[in-house]
Amino acid sequence: MRQQDGGTKSRQVPIWQKSNLTLEEAAAYSGIGINKLRSMTDSDECKFVLWNGTKRLIKRRKLDEYLDKAFSI
């Protein structure tokens, strides 16, 4: 039987396999609130933010490294 969408099925990549995450995805992944992530990534010193124009993406591996070393946020 043919699918209604033309035979293709969209696949979502799990968050833990993505290289870059939106703020919403990063919040779900890390357990850190969106507002806290936004304030953390506003700093010029932040190593885990990637700017695409005005869109803010979080580098998942760099975020993991940062959190592994952090005592508190």
Image (cartoon, rainbow, N blue to C red):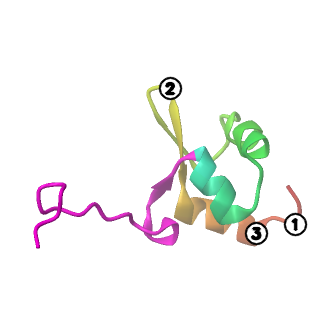
Q: Which of 8 and 45 is in front in this view?
A: 8
Horizontally, residue 13 falls left or right of residue 5, namely right
Counting residues from the N terminus, which is met first, the one under dot 2 or under dot 3?
A: 2
Q: For mark 3, does the 10 Å Cα neighbourhood hold few (<14), some (14 to 19), or many (20 or more) residues?
A: few
The correct choice, above or below, for 15 with respect to 35 in the image is below
- What stretch of residues is rendered in magenta? 1-22
Kind of residue indicated by mark 2: Thr
Magenta highlight on residue 42: no
Q: Nearer the viewer, mark 2 or mark 1?
A: 2
Horizontally, residue 38 falls left or right of residue 8, namely right
Kind of residue indicated by mark 1: Phe
Disc ID at residue 54? 2
Give the residue at mark 3.
69
Report which quarter residue 61 is drawn in: bottom right
Magenta highlight on residue 6: yes
Q: Nearer the viewer, residue 9 or 73?
A: 9
Disc ID at residue 71? 1
Kind of residue indicated by mark 3: Lys
Counting residues from the N terminus, which is met first, the one under dot 2 or under dot 1?
A: 2
Considering every residue shown, the one lying at the far top of the view is: 54
Q: Which of marks 2 and 3 is in front?
A: 2
For label 2, the SS is loop
